[in-house]
Amino acid sequence: MNTLKNKVNLIGRLGAKPTVQQFDSGAKMMRISLATNERYKDKKGEWVDNTQWHNVVAWGNLCDRISKILDKGSEVVIEGRLVNKSYESKGGEKRFSTEIELNDFMVLNAKKQESNQ
């Protein structure tokens, strides 16, 4: 194995309407909040729902595609890569975050309402 890959695939639902940010350079960035959940039985035999929230970032033409199709509650499959970041808080503390940089997506169940329907 010559190359080690940084690749992540998730199936989940959007927790909020995607937000777009346009930069002075003309570049577009979109932030997406994606929820995945697992259901399992605990030691007592009771069902437990475990929801994980993922921060997803899309760039460029993906932003246009997403804004036309997806809305809060849309179910999607995403493919991307993990990006780890560090920054300093206002209080001077070092903080870390992980985002998924979106490469592509596939809609399973779109929630965006079509006009004239």
Image (spheres, rainbow, N blue to C red):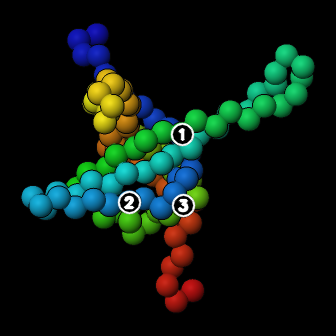
How far from the left and from the top, in percent, is residue 113? 54, 76
Q: Is residue 55 above or below residue 70?
A: above
Left or right, 2 with reference to 42: left
User: For residue 72, which numbered disc appears in the image?
Assistant: 3
Q: Earlier in the sequence, mark 2 or mark 1?
A: 2
Crowding near pointer 2: few (<14 within 10 Å), some, many (20+)?
A: few
Three-letter residue code for mark 1: Trp
Three-letter residue code for mark 2: Thr
Left or right, 92 with reference to 48: left
User: For residue 20, which numbered disc appears in the image?
Assistant: none
Q: What element does badge 2 sit on?
A: strand
Per the image, the residue denoted by label 1 is 53
Q: Are marks 1 and 3 in contact (CB under 8 Å)?
A: no
Q: Is residue 20 above or below residue 59?
A: below
Kindly identify the residue that appears in the image at 85 percent across and 16 percent down: 43
Crowding near pointer 1: few (<14 within 10 Å), some, many (20+)?
A: some
Which quadrant holds residue 45? top right
How far from the left and from the top, in percent, is residue 101? 32, 40
Q: What element does badge 3 sit on?
A: loop
Which quadrant holds residue 60? bottom left
User: For residue 19, which numbered disc appears in the image?
Assistant: 2
Q: Are marks 2 and 1 in contact (CB under 8 Å)?
A: no
Instruction: Give how far apart the Cα atoms at labels 1 and 3 are.
Output: 14 Å
Instruction: Give how far apart the Cα atoms at labels 2 and 1 are.
Output: 16 Å
Q: Is residue 77 above or below residue 22?
A: above
